[in-house]
């Protein structure tokens, strides 16, 4: 029940290859793909969680063969179609494009600096009261799947599903991606940093004192008994 | 239970398969629909190629090393502190600074995608976005560090931060020995991008 993007802990990927700090993009079209995605996102036709879900929902075959920015382009084309901003015929180039009713929200060059500086904070007031405090022992939900939508978006990685950890910190109350990616609204709830001993996650941890911290929403967690 | 939309027959397959042509086709389409200003794309690219990058983060680290009150405030509420320096923005809305010590070495990853503190470090490097880093660093951080030529003392624990939410993490590397008396500009030169992700040490290169 996992998707390929959920790869934390996977075996067989080979070395990580360092690169100099001044290498920012690796092909001429990469910056264009990045900027196109950022600018289109600023129109507000879809939210960040829908955008992430579109990338991770690429078929396994596409997810593996696409380079990083090809995943961005694939996800962008898919999500724009999903929300009805472009049609399949427009993507295929078989019809003349129709002007979009969202055109008035277009990000013009003179607004770029302001929009990038403003960002998109996701902390929100919430009716859901925090039930855990720093030091509390918790267990992560057993299945790394969306609780309401089978195969839907979740930010619970498989390697931590079902694992026992400890609350390190309450970050605040944040938009819940599992809801927001599927039209369920922002549904903000408490978000915690949860720390797991490496030995709780891996059969062969490298070091007895190593740890992994995962940010988890309250509904991913139950109190450890 | 509702099911997610099927992924076969994806709309993206209607675009040209060559990625350079694909991005051009999509840009042309969205421009014709009035959703994109091509000049805005130039501006976004210029921002991340020339204006926002890891020197921002290096300034934060160098100041934390030289100013204890700044360091304390940074560890308490990084978002507010970096905003005061003008480093608030897209993909850095909720910041947390984590400090390396003799006991703990911090590393940052996003196993599910590529979340990264853009206003402080710019666009993530290729390796940060790679399958190898995302898959391995949570399970074998020391072997990943070895790929970067870093070997930690046996008594140092590794704490890996997986950026699964909108919290973004900046590692404050340990200040190298023998740098007492150096000013902020000189200290900045010791702070590599990798040292602020946790795959490097400050002053190492």
Image (tube, grey):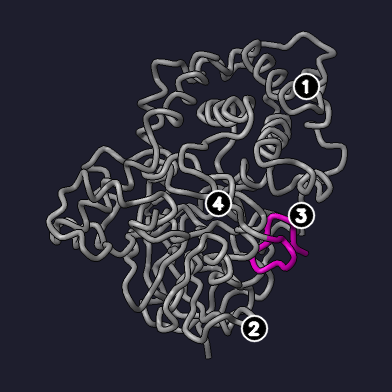
Question: Relative to the observer, which residue lies in front, B144 or A56?
Answer: B144
Region rendered in magenta: A1-14
In the picture, the disc for residue A18 is 4
**Vertical order, B171 against B151 (above or below):** above
The answer to whether B44 appears left or right of B139 in the picture is: left
Name the residue nearer the viewer: B100 or A189: B100
Q: Are marks 3 and 2 on the same chain?
A: no
* Residue topped by disc 2: A204
Quarter where residue A25 is shown = top right
Discs 1/4, front: 4
Taking the magenta stretch, the answer to whether it contains residue A3 is yes
Mark 2 crowdedness (10 Å alpha carbons): few <14, some 14-19, many ≥20: few
Are the two marked residues, 1 and 4, in contact with CB atoms closer than 8 angstroms? no
Residue position for label 3 = B2
Mark positioned earlier in the residue sequence (2 or 1): 1
Whole-number angstrom distance, CA of label 2 to CA of label 1: 48 Å
Seen in the picture, residue B14 relative to A217 is either above or below; the reply is above
CA–CA distance in space, label 3 to label 4: 43 Å
Q: In the image, which is nearer the foreground, mark 3 or mark 4? A: 4
Q: Nearer the viewer, mark 3 or mark 2?
A: 2
Number of residues whose C-alpha sits closer than 10 Å to that of mark 3, classed few (under 14), some (14–19) or many (20 or more) = few
- The chain to which mark 2 is attached is A
**Element at label 2:** loop
Q: Distance between the residues labelled 3 and 2?
A: 38 Å
Residue B153, how many percent across, how many down?
Answer: 42, 78
The residue wearing badge 1 is A91
Crowd rating for badge 4 (residues with CA inside 10 Å; few <14, some 14–19, many 20+): some
Which residue reaches farthest bottom?
A225
């Amino acid at each position: 029940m996992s998707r390929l993007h959920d790869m934390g802990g996977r075996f067989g990927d080979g070395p990580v290859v360092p690169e100099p700090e001044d290498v920012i993009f690796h092909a001429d079209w990469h910056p264009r793909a990045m900027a196109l995605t950022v600018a289109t996102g600023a129109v507000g036709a879809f939210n960040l969680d829908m955008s992430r879900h579109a990338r991770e929902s690429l078929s396994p075959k596409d997810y593996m063969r696409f380079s990083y920015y090809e995943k961005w382009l694939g996800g962008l084309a898919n999500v724009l179609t999903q929300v009805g901003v472009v049609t399949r015929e427009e993507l295929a180039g078989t019809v003349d494009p129709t002007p979009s009713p969202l055109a008035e929200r277009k990000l013009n060059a003179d607004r770029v600096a302001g929009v990038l500086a403003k960002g998109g904070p996701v902390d929100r007031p919430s009716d859901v009261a925090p039930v855990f405090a720093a030091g509390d022992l918790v267990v992560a939900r057993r299945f790394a799947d969306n609780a309401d939508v089978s195969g839907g978006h979740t930010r619970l990685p498989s390697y931590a599903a079902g694992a026992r950890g400890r609350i390190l910190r309450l970050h605040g109350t944040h938009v819940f991606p599992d809801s927001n990616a599927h039209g369920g609204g922002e549904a903000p709830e408490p978000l915690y940093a949860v720390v797991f001993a490496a030995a709780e996650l891996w059969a062969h941890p490298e070091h007895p004192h190593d740890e992994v911290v995962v940010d988890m929403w309250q509904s991913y967690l139950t109190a450890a008994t | 239970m509702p099911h997610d939309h099927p992924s076969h027959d994806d709309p993206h397959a209607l675009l040209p398969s060559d990625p350079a042509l694909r991005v051009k086709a999509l840009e042309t389409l969205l421009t014709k629909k009035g959703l994109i200003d091509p000049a805005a794309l130039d501006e976004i690219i210029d921002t991340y190629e020339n204006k926002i990058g890891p020197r921002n983060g290096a300034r934060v680290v160098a100041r934390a090393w030289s100013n204890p009150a700044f360091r304390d405030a940074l560890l308490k509420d990084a978002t507010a502190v970096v905003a005061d320096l003008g480093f608030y923005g897209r993909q850095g809305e909720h910041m947390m600074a984590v400090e390396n010590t003799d006991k703990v070495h911090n590393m940052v990853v996003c196993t599910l995608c590529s979340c990264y503190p853009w206003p402080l470090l710019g666009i993530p490097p290729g390796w940060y976005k790679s399958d190898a880093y995302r898959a391995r660093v949570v399970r074998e951080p020391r072997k990943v560090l070895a790929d970067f030529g870093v070997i930690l003392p046996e008594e140092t624990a590794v704490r890996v931060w997986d950026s699964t939410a909108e919290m973004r993490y900046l590692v404050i590397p340990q200040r190298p020995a023998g740098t007492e008396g150096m000013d902020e500009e000189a200290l900045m030169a010791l702070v590599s991008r990798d040292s602020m992700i946790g795959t490097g040490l400050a002053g190492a290169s």
